[in-house]
């Protein structure tokens, strides 16, 4: 575009500021939505990767009863009491490709300290739990195998539980009561936040599985178990073998399984799917807004052609070619849309930052989002400007001067 076209476009738009501003509103909303959509998509990918890394690798979860994954969260449909400690032992001993197995029994309970009370999840498990989930204490230590065998009343607090019960004080060596049963605090876990299955790892207390089942809750079954496979490639085969072994151990015959086997990779895929659906919805809103913006710019430029017929006639009379008139009006629409796009990018970035501060999503602003936003607005401007520019170039200079 030559300098003269840009100057002419600037003068034309400044003469109709309010009209130009209203014409760009659709473009502004559309581009802002696009920037927000890209930020959501990038943020979702980063969040999923972070959760995947924090959970440890090659994980498989076996749950009692029927469980499904919705939006990346585990939803319990049917409960069963047929999953036993001996099942986890059999899987660890008899299935090739399994590195570690940690049985789990968990239940929400009121926990009391000398000066505070809180409700949290009590998780009975074994020392392998920390290695499988890549989750370790920052204060004190985790319980040992001999403490599991001896059914000792020792507890390792999640970071949030430690804060709720003891504030900034080191709770190692203190006593807490779970269902009126005293436990000695031997450690505090690192802060890790919500895991891939939607559980807050900081809001739990870890105790020996034998203590949980026989001395605290008096049950003979477990809720679930978590496995570590030796490699990502081994996961499908390990899952198939686990299903076959548990089906035999539970003597199910032709009946359906009373357990659910899920890999963490499946949960991650469901999370990504949910994020993609949300991004598509935002993209649909952006597309509609951009369409409205194109129509607005088109209407404004057609109106401008009608109002500037005499100007066009004068320019043609002094030597302007049809291509000059076409480029002049096309430049005006592109400049108008570019301004709307720049405003949309700015608003999209502000909305993304606000969502990051106020919500649970981690949104990522990238150069790609800025480029896509500006490119979309310019493309919208060119699409809206072609017909008005063509109409302007077809104006008869003799008839225009008679007006």
Image (tube, grey):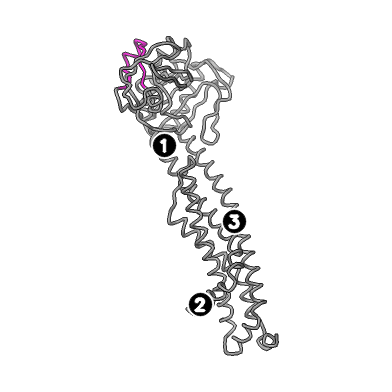
| Residues under numbered marks 1 and 2 in contact, where contact means CB atoms less than 8 Å apart | no
Q: Position of residue 184 (x, y in %)?
A: 34, 15
Q: Earlier in the sequence, mark 1 or mark 3?
A: 1
- Percent across and percent down for residue 311 are 62, 83
Is 309 in front, or is 290? 309
The residue beneath circle 3 is 287
Which quadrant of the structure image shows residue 105? top left
Quadrant holding the C terminus: bottom right
Q: How many marks?
A: 3
In the rendered structure, which segment of residues is drawn in magenta?
141-156
Label whose residue precedes the other's in the sequence (1 or 2): 2
Mark number displayed over residue 145? none
In-front residue for pair 403/363: 403
Between 68 and 184, the residue placed more toward the observer is 184
Q: Quadrant of residue 155?
A: top left
Residue at which label 2 appears: 7
Which of 234/381 is in front?
A: 381
Whether residue 154 is in magenta: the answer is yes
Q: Which residue is mark 1?
A: 52
Q: Please identify, in this view, whether the residue under mark 2 or under mark 3 is nearer the observer.
A: 2
Residue 147, placed above or below residue 361: above
Q: Nearer the viewer, mark 1 or mark 3?
A: 3
Label 1 secondary element: helix
Q: Secondary structure at mark 3?
A: helix
The answer to whether residue 93 is seen in the rendering is no
Residue at 46% over, 24% down: 242
For the question of whether residue 196 can be seen, the reply is: yes
- In the figure, 360 relative to 120: above or below? below
């Amino acid at each position: 575009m030559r300098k003269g076209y840009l100057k002419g476009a600037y003068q034309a738009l400044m003469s109709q500021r309010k009209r130009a501003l209203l014409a760009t509103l659709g473009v502004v909303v559309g581009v802002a939505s696009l920037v927000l959509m890209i930020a959501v998509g990038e943020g979702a990918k980063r969040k999923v990767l972070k959760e995947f890394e924090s959970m440890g690798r090659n994980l498989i979860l076996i749950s009692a009863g029927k469980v499904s994954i919705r939006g990346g969260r585990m939803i319990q449909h049917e409960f069963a009491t047929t999953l036993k400690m001996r099942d986890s032992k059999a899987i660890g001993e008899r299935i090739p490709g399994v590195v570690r197995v940690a049985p789990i029994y968990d239940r929400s309970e009121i926990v009391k300290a000398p000066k505070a009370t809180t409700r949290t999840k009590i998780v009975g498990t074994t020392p392998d739990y920390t290695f499988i989930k890549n989750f370790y204490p920052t204060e004190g230590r985790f319980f040992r195998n001999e403490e599991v065998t001896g059914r000792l009343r020792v507890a390792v607090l999640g970071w949030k539980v430690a804060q709720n019960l003891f504030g900034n004080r080191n709770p190692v060596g203190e006593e807490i009561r779970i269902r009126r049963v005293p436990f000695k605090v031997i450690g505090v876990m690192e802060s890790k936040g919500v895991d891939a299955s939607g559980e807050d790892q900081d809001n739990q207390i870890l105790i020996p599985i034998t203590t949980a089942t026989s001395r605290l809750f008096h049950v003979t079954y477990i809720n679930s178990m978590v496995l570590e496979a030796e490699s990502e490639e081994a996961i499908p085969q390990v899952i198939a073998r686990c299903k076959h072994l548990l089906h035999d151990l539970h003597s199910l015959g032709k009946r359906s399984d009373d357990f659910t086997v899920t890999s963490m990779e499946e949960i991650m895929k469901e999370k990504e799917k949910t994020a993609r659906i949300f991004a598509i919805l935002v993209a649909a809103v952006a597309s509609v807004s951009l369409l409205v913006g194109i129509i607005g710019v088109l209407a404004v430029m057609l109106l401008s052609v009608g109002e500037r017929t005499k100007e066009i006639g004068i320019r043609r009379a002094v030597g302007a070619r049809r291509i000059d008139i076409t480029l002049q009006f096309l430049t005006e629409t592109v400049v108008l849309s570019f301004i709307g796009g720049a405003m949309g990018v700015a608003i999209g970035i502000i909305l993304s930052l606000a969502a990051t501060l106020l919500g649970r999503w981690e949104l990522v602003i990238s150069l790609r989002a800025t480029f896509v936003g500006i490119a979309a607005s310019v493309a919208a401007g060119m699409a809206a400007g072609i017909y008005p520019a063509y109409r302007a170039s077809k104006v008869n200079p003799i008839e225009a001067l008679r007006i």
